[in-house]
Amino acid sequence: MGMEGDGPDDGRPAPRPKAPLGERASWRLLLDQVRPHRRVLLLGGLLSLVGSLAGLAMPVMAKRVIDAFGAGGALAGPVIGLSAAVLAGALISAAGRFLLERMGETIVLDSRRGLVDRILRLTVSDVDRLKPGDLLSRVSSDTTLLRAVCTDALASLVGAVFMFLGAAVMMAIMDGLLLGVTLAVVGLVALMGVAIAPRIRRASLQAQVALGEMSSVLDRALQAFRTVKASGAEARETAVVGAAAVEARDRGVAAAAWTSLAGIGAWMSVQLAFLAVLGVGGARVASGEMEISALIAFLLYLFYLVSPIGQIIQSLTQIQNGLAAVTRIQEITTLRTEPAAEPVVRAGGEPVGVTFSGVVFRYGDDRPVVHHDVTFEVPAGGMTALVGPSGAGKSTVFGLIERFYEPQEGTITVGGRDIRDWPLGELRAMLGYVEQDAPVLAGTLRENLVFGAPGTTDEEIARALARTRLDDLVERLPEGLETPVGHRGILLSGGERQRVAIARALLRRPRLLLLDEATSQLDAVNEMRLREVVAEVARETTVLVIAHRLSTVTGADRIVVMEAGRVRAWGTHDELVAADELYRELAATQFLVSS
């Protein structure tokens, strides 16, 4: 049985994001974002239509003002009517635009929530192959482009289309011939815009990909900020990031060039239409077929087309950018995810044992085998240690127990039950896991301690602090448990971060505690104290510990020796010193036995 989710989870290479979607598929995805809000879209569109109709009354009112002036009549009535039309159109249009923009913000909020939820539920194997900076770019930059589409572009497009159609109807009523001339000119230039649109989309997608790559390169430098400085590599990293920025600039310039070309087409269409109408209309006025006031009103309606055409072109350009953003957001949905079931954060209960039987594992089909027929047993209760040279596959054991990965062959049982039969939330609730680098999150010390067990009481925190010898640290901190620990816990020492990670794991009351090099950054005194804590915890639960320092595990109930992805021996410290050459060599190099 594979991991629950949207696809297989068998240790094979994470599926790459699919090729960019076609324009029709991208449009369908964009419309899927809008469809749940179609009622608001309809209402906003109707208000925009009413506002447009009020605005479209202006040229007719202007014609009446001109006719009244020519006939020597009163101007007060037409002027008041003209002013009222302007005010009413502005207010109604503003209300419609507000509704559409609020709808757009809601769409973006839903998209961001869904994208973040999806990213945080990706399988570890997929995230191992992805770049954090690119993922951040999809949540921030790409959804920002989507917001521009759903708020500015969509709102402008709806209003502009209604204004264009309304102006066209009024122009048809006034003079069908001149309308035909206008639409003929505008249509020819519109064909050019249709041809340019796919190029804008492709250029925008390339620009966004380049921006994501730049974010990834910068994130790489920031993650190793101290190493960069200590290595005197500031200039080199600046050059690398700068090269990525240049690539993003070049891609952006290419997109801007196509966008500018589309804008020129919109401007040309209006200018050519104006010249054509002026020529044809002027000839008709000269022949007496048309009144001068009607020509002026028609030209006013023509200028009413200037703004809608420009807005339509701009909106369609923004939508092309949005289609590129939708494509990149959609790529995340092609990756596998873990189930969305609510986890049980504090299960409690009796200790559980672990059994590996013939486990074979590799991180991908293109990667070497990490585990070769790994078989061993961890009894329920007590402490079992995994030792061996670097690269022996010890940390991978923990990744398989946590179901971050799935083995290609063999079975793993926890508590006598196949690990794949456990609901993922229940499985991980049983486990307390201290990673090798003991990550600490930005926030307060309290937030880090209760991260895995939000319902922890102050008494439980105090007990965990005392067991891990962190109570002295809390007393020294200016705000005690409420003291911020900095980005990645930078304000704590390496040993303090390790003890925070251990306390965090203990507060979950695990039935199986996994410690990966949990004492590597501790001094001798604190290591000895923590050994005592681990020995005490081992009387209550099952402890499985990985250690390069054999002094940490010499008192373990069972020690499993791994080498090159295989289990070569197991037993107690004394048994292994007597029977296993590799273990005896490791013990001798650490002065635990005489060589």
Image (cartoon, grey):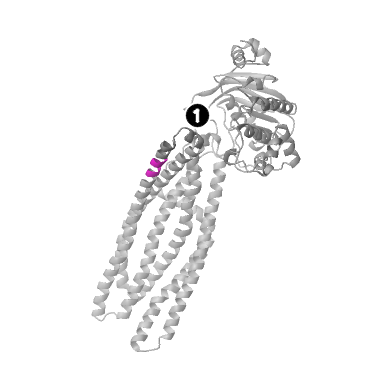
Left or right of 174 on screen, residue 7:
right
Vertical comparison of 282 with 215: above or below: below
> Around disc 1, counting alpha carbons within 10 Å, would you say few (fewer than 14), some (14 to 19), or many (20 or more)?
some
Relative height, residue 201 to residue 453 (above, below): below
Placement of the N terminus among the 4 image quadrants: top right
Residue named by callout 1 = 364
Kindly indicate the quadrant of the structure image that contains residue 301.
bottom left
Q: Residue at x 31, y 77 (%)?
A: 295
User: Measured along the vertical axis of the image, is residue 78 above or below residue 150?
Assistant: below
Q: Position of residue 79 (x, y in %)?
A: 42, 82
Determine whether, in the image, residue 212 is placed left or right of residue 189.
Answer: right
Q: Quadrant of the C terminus?
A: top right
Q: Position of residue 260 (x, y in %)?
A: 34, 56
Q: Is residue 156 magenta?
A: no
Q: Is residue 164 left or right of residue 125?
A: left
Between residues 189 and 351, which one lies in front from this camera angle? Answer: 351
Whether residue 571 is visible here, answered yes or no, is yes
Which portion, as a residue range, is magenta? 241-246
Q: Nearer the viewer, residue 465 or 251?
A: 465
- Relative side of 394 to 30, left or right: right
Amino acid found under the numbered disc labelled 1: Gly
Residue 17, percent from left and from top: 46, 40
State whether residue 96 is above or below residue 244.
Answer: below
Q: Is residue 344 visible?
A: no
Q: Nearer the viewer, residue 522 or 357?
A: 522
Image position, residue 471 (x, y; %)? 71, 36
Q: Main secondary structure of the magenta part?
A: helix
Quadrant in the rendering for residue 191: bottom left
Count of numbered circles in the view: 1
Element at badge 1? loop
